[in-house]
Amino acid sequence: MSARLILKTFGPFLRPQWLGCVLAALLAIAGAGVALLKPWPLKYLFDKVLFPSGSPAPQNVQTILLLVIAALGGIAILDSLVSSARSYVLTVVGERVAASVRTKLYDRLQRLPLRYHERMPTGELTTRLTGDVDKVQALLTGTLVDASTNIMTLAGMAGVLLILDWQLSLGLLLTLPLLLLTVAGFRARIRAVEEKSRVVEGDMAAVAQEALVAIKLIKATGKEDHESRRFRDRSNDSVAAVLRSARTSAVFGAAVDAVVATATAGLIWLGAQRVLTGDLTPGDLVIFTSYLRDFFSPTRALSKLPAQLTRAGVRAARIADTLQRPLELQDKPGARPAAPPKEKLSLERVSFAYTADRLVLRSVDLTVPVGTTLAVVGPTGAGKSTIAALMCRLQDPTSGRVLLDDADLRDLTGESVHTHVGLVTQEALLFRATIRENIAYGRPDASLDEIKRAARAALAHDFVTALPHGYDTVLSERGATLSGGQRQRLALARAVLQDCPILVLDEPTTGLDARSEHSVLRALRQVASGRTSVIITHRMTAAMAADDIVVLDGGQVVEHGTHRTLIAAGGLYAEMCLLQGITGPRPVLKRKGAGYRRPANPPREIEADEPTTHLGESRP
């Protein structure tokens, strides 16, 4: 990624800090000016006091020496003050820019589609938010500003040296092509090793993230040593990659230093010869030698700038990839707010594919009238969780429409859709916060009484009040100290408090023991009372009491009806019930029918199962 593309991508983050950037630039100019002043008191000392040519030495030598020392000290103090002020200003600008980039990047990650997060390791995304942003910040507010200062310093020195002696200046300028050739020879190698180092770093972070999330599985299977070895291998790979990068940089730096040292020695010899012939004064040689040292210091830094740009560019490219990635689910121009549902939520000939050759749903039609409960069942990979994602507009269909009453969800604002259609996922997602804050996540302004009512509706109030601090109990990460049933009931309470008229529950009883499942099912019946509900499940006990049941297989609807009629039909649903120990019809149902429409096309198998990492599926 070139400097131009880096500035194009990150320039908008620098613009709000223009005042600080201008101040840093002025301080850089002042610093360059102070650098040019440093050797001039010594020139006066050598030419007028120590080695006066054609005129006697002044009588007040001690006074002149004191003035020279005072001038040297004053210039050094001024240089330190200017350098410190510039460093502070750059730190302020850098931290603000980094915060803006990190916030924008995090916001972008929140809005990117589920399929992007399913493909990207969490550790890799975390590295982009932290290490990559820090590297780019250092480039934008440190490296590039230092480069600008060095360029101004070199320009000033070159002008002074041309005035002092054009022949020495010409010899100095002839060394620059050697430096450029050295830089060109190493640039490709540095980019290659930096890209490898960055990939290994992201891989190591991803391994650590996966292992820490799956710590219970690791302990249950006794794989602590295996995971330690796996991380150690990644860590060793990271060390090797960093060392390769360090070796390449060291060789590059040594090559640059060798060119600089050779040029410096040659130019000092040439300058001494010109002093001996009388073409230069000793003071001129002092200035030239001082400038020569200071000239090659910024020249060396500038010669390493392409390598620094390359290293930072690798990281900047990854940040830019995320920032510039298009959002798949955006409100259309003129999208209108969704009205409260009055009739139904429906899928109309909906097909969905994660890739062009990977159809998960084929021409699915189903309808959920307001106030009824629909259960969607079927074997693993049938497309159940994809339907949940489509109903909540976490995905858009490849073809067909998802309708709220008669409005296509794509014609409505996303925020309003999520206000009317709520989701409870298979994994009860809880935050490291109080129970009160977790329940009120969808409505942070809810009162404690409202939170308690929602908890009672989800049958969570009793176990919450039994905890040491009740609703102020701080949960561990992901609520690990609670049972699966307790976590799921807190998730239900959160959905109740959000008060969406339509509730989609994706595998709400998966992984629960019989007692927890019974508790959650009781809570589900209470929560579903009086609202439109869609239960996505492969557990027949969760589907039995629904007003209507849709059976998916191979991405298509193969059966529909009530529990009693589907048992009597003896099809896939009856087979699934038999496998789960349910052999007879449920005697009592609260409501009849759900307005289901049979699909036009006969069912057929799809080539690949639904991915296991989308909505409702656990990730390690």
Image (cartoon, rainbow, N blue to C red):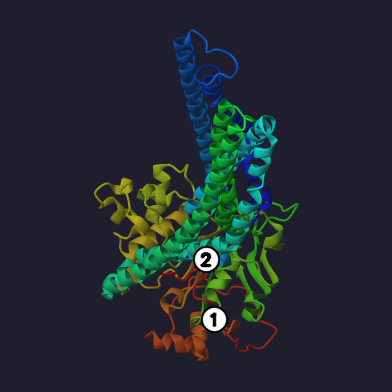
The mark found on residue 104 in the picture is none
- The answer to the question of whether label 1 and label 2 lie on touching residues, with beta carbons closer than 8 A, is no
Judging from the image, what secondary structure is the residue with disc 1 in?
A: loop
Q: Position of residue 254 (x, y in %)?
A: 49, 54
Name the amino acid type tagged 1.
Ala
The CA distance from mark 1 to mark 2 is 24 Å
**Residue located at (49% from left, 17% from top):** 68
Along the polypeptide, which appears first: circle 1 or circle 2? 2
Left or right? Give the position of 477 relative to 107.
left
Image check: 579 left or right of 258? left
Q: Which mark is residue 120?
A: 2
Instruction: Name above or below for residue 91 compared with residue 435.
Output: above
- Residue 507 in view (yes/no): yes
Task: Tell me which amino acid carries mark 2.
Answer: Met
The residue wearing badge 1 is 382
> How busy is the neighbourhood of tag 1: few (under 14 within 10 Å), some, or many (20 plus)?
many
